[in-house]
Image (spheres, grey):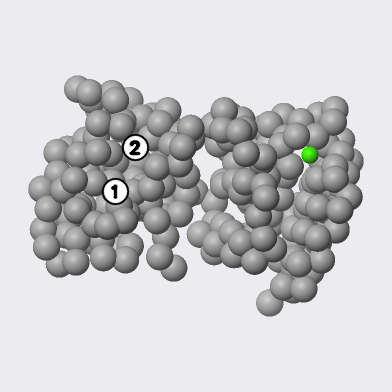
Amino acid sequence: MSKKKIVIIEDEPDILEVLSYNLKREGFDVFTAVNGTLGLSLVNKENPDLLLLDLMLPGMDGIEICSNVKSNPANQNTLIIMVTAKGEESDIVLGLGVGADDYITKPFSPKELVARVKAVLRRGTLVESVPRQDQVQVGKLAIDPTKYEVTVAGNEIRLTATEFRLLHYLASNPGRVFSREQLLSRAMGDDVVVVDRNIDVHIRGIRKKMNTEPPMIETIRGVGYRLRDPA
Ligand code: CA
């Protein structure tokens, strides 16, 4: 099996070195750039499996790079993890909106980073579509769309149509963070009349019915929601 390629764009040399060292040690083929312009040409040249992208960069910023990479068909298989600082939640929402696959907030340990990189590589690019008709199993949660059935630890729970679609969508992409806007447009779709477009209300309803501690659906403050990935 060939090594997975990772490009890191980060303007702080110390951080860049730590990231690069730890990912190389895990057996990844690592390429680095200290600004957006160099980074973008590196991405286009190497066509990496994953791009670790600092959001706060001089010149071309992370959002612009992310949008650039994701709109280029040649890079369609490149996954993107944004690296953000605390308090940049609105940037995270923007980044997810232009196609970033995940994010990690500074400060983080090398161990956390490696785990996140592996998780994103494992689950791959999200296929953007109406939720599939496949059965989904995440930890104690099992969903069978053909029977419209949801069980938690073997016990069936009854969800509204909107709650069902939301949970099925989140569970089809475990570990991945979605903004409220993304959940509305992707999980709900344009064809469905959603009576209440307040995602928070539906999530609260699902959590109450699932009744797990901690809740399987995690609130990412200022960003949105994700279903915990127990893997
Ligand atoms: Ca920076």
Going by the numbered disc 1, the residue's amino acid type is His
The answer to whether marks 2 and 1 mark residues whose Cβ atoms lie closer than 8 Å is yes
User: Residue placed at 19% from the left, 53% from the top?
Assistant: 211
Residue 121: x and y in percent read: 59, 61
User: Taking 155 as reference, is 120 left or right?
Assistant: right
Going by the numbered disc 2, the residue's amino acid type is Ala
Residue 145: x and y in percent read: 21, 52
N-terminal of the pair, mark 2 or mark 1, is 1
Of 57 and 74, nearer the camera is 57
User: Residue placed at 62% from the left, 46% from the top?
Assistant: 105
Q: Is residue 15 above or below residue 112?
A: above
User: Taking 188 as reference, is 224 left or right?
Assistant: right
Question: Which image quadrant: the N terminus?
Answer: bottom right
Residue 146 seen anywhere in this rendered image of the structure? no
Displayed quadrant of residue 72: top right
Which structural element holds mark 1?
Answer: helix
Does mark 2 have its CB less than 8 Å from ligand 1? no
Which structural element holds mark 2?
Answer: helix
Of 14 and 3, nearer the camera is 14
Of 77 and 121, nearer the camera is 121
Classify 10 Å Cα crowding around label 1: few (below 14), some (14-19), many (20 and above).
Answer: many
Residue 135: x and y in percent read: 26, 60
User: Taking 77 as reference, is 123 left or right?
Assistant: left
Mark 1, residue position: 168
Q: In this view, does 182 lie above or below 138?
A: above
Residue 205: x and y in percent read: 20, 39
Q: In this view, does 120 lie above or below 167?
A: below
| CA separation in Å, label 2 and label 1 | 8 Å
Mark 2, residue position: 187
Give the image quadrant in which the ligand numbered 1 is located. top right
User: Residue placed at 34% from the left, 49% from the top?
Assistant: 217
Residue 215 seen anywhere in this rendered image of the structure? yes
